[in-house]
Image (cartoon, coloured by chain):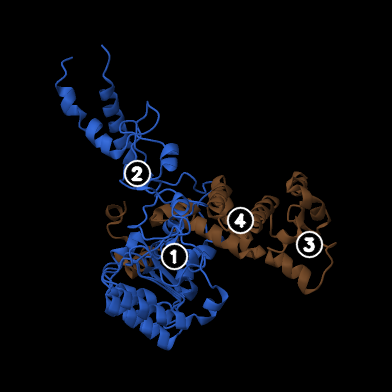
Chain colours: A blue, B brown
Amino acid sequence: MEIPQFLEYQEHEAVDNSAQKVPILPSDAIKEKQAGPPHEALFLILTYLPLFELLAMNQVCTSLRDAVNKDVLSWLNIIVDKALSLKLSDEILMKITSKANGRLRTLALMNCAKITDNGLQQVVEQNPLISKLYLPACTGLTPEGVIRAVKTLSDHGHCLKSIMINGIYNINKQHLETLESYLHEMNLDAKKEQPGSWPLLLLEYMDSPTFRHDKGHTIIDLEVCPKCDEVRMVFDCPRWACKRMIERSMTRCRGCRFCILRCQECGGCVDSQEIEEAVCAHILCSDCWLHLPKCNFCNKPYCKQHVDNKCCTSGSTGFVCEVCYAKYIVNLPSIVEYVDF
Amino acid sequence: MSTSTDNNASITQESGPSAAVQDIQKKIVVRTADGEVFNLKEEVAMEIDIIKTFFQEDSISYETVMPLPNVEGWEMVKVIEYCTKHVELKHKVDGYKERKAFQALFVQNLSTKSLLALTNTANYLEVKYLLDFLCQAVSEQIKNKDVDYVRELFGVENDFNDEEYEQVKAEAPWAHENLNNDLH
């Protein structure tokens, strides 16, 4: 009698589970001889590391620890990412930023919900030379707190070139105007050199949000959406001649994400009639949907952000998405029980 | 050497009408540590600050072959590849996707060891944007990874004694608590 295909999946799942218990080691490790002193280049990368990785390097060996601790350069650009964002308290922030000896240049706190206005103010008072202040989704902050911090920087250091505040609650047009006036005053030269700014594409923003200033994007990440008149992040369209532009000739395809739906893969605008959905519920345009690999069961693709959530089953090509996997494969043992062999 | 002919070949492949003009374009010659000789187009060579300084500061004639004793042949090939692409994309408005695709291919077949060696070279040659890119690439490799992984990846020996190690961990105890639970 043929073993039903369902049982095969179950076996493979068991094998997968046991395989996952082995610690994940880099397949690409420098293996040729006994471990030794750190490569010279490792000292070069220190200033590029976000906080979490910097702290890890600090623990690798004595020479790297010395380099991290004694070199103030590694502490001038603090980037707190997903790994540490929820652990960062005001106190820890103070401790970390004090290592810059007052010369902190970039403070990027991505989704650091525990940081308060007071915490931010303390850092800013001790480090007036900050030029990039990125606080996206730091929901513990208020618009008033941000304004106070920006004013302090304007009065004392006058170096602020770029801020991100998308995700902080309750920012209205007045707040935005106040911030704009401080920032434009600090960047009069920049305005003369670059009358316009580089268009902001969804894809670029998601890939490397903290490089916005280097790419010539706007000084504040928020503006008033030309379509709905609310304070939002506004994106441009990467399509050379997108449908929207052609249909409503003359209006640029610029708007917030509520007004103009964009494909998660390519950032291009998507008509409400031709929306395709990914497993993760993100929107895709039909072109991107066509060339992405799809789940064997429900025929939906993943967007590249979530593609690691797919479940592979050996013995068949392609993949099964996590939803179908849970629905059809994990639940099978109860179905199999009813089959009489 | 195949590398020199590659450089020459890339000129004739470019757009027809200006090919004749480019043939007359000045070339700069460098020699790497392993004796390989490279003919660089002037505009690409000038992207490499150490070369630019060498020729411009003392007005040295382009006939001089510049020695690069700290650079290997294969590294020079990669540096030229990156700089050439950079010059090409400089004036393109919508080069973002192309640049991303190129960068992904550029590091695809490089081992960790090679990546580190190339990073050092980019630093020595003083090509800022290449150094930035390579440092980012190395930094991506250890993103969200713990200390053991980093040591293993870069082949670094743990030379802390127990006391020192406890001290270093005590500096930021909150950073590595519940490591596996938080990362998803």
Residue sitting farthest toward the top: A1
Q: Which mark is residue B66?
A: 3
* Residue topped by disc 1: A210
The C terminus of chain A: image quadrant: top left
Q: Check the residue under mark 2 and report the chain it is in.
A: A
Q: Between label 3 and label 2, give the one nearer the viewer.
A: 2
**Circle 1: element type:** helix
Which residue occupies 32% across, 77% down?
A: A175
Residue sitting farthest toward the left: A338
Front residue (pair A204, A254): A254
> Is the residue under label 1 in contact with that under label 4 (CB below 8 Å)?
no
Q: Position of residue A197 (x, y in %)?
A: 51, 68
* Other-residue count near label 1 (Cα within 10 Å), few / some / many at <14 / 14–19 / ≥20: many
Q: Are marks 3 and 4 on the same chain?
A: yes
Q: Between label 1 and label 2, give the one nearer the viewer.
A: 2
* Residue topped by disc 4: B118
Q: Which amino acid, by three-letter code, is at mark 1?
A: Thr
Q: Position of residue B78 (x, y in %)?
A: 65, 52
**Label 2, label 4: how many angstroms apart (C-alpha)?**
49 Å
Q: Position of residue A261 (x, y in %)?
A: 36, 52
Q: Between label 3 and label 1, give the one nearer the viewer.
A: 1
**Label 4, label 1: how many angstroms apart (C-alpha)?**
25 Å
Q: Which amino acid, by three-letter code, is at mark 3?
A: Met
> Is the residue under label 2 in contact with that under label 3 (CB below 8 Å)?
no
* Residue topped by disc 2: A273
**Circle 3: element type:** strand
Q: Position of residue B35 (x, y in %)?
A: 77, 52
Sequence-first disc among 3 and 4: 3
**Label 3, label 4: how many angstroms apart (C-alpha)?**
19 Å
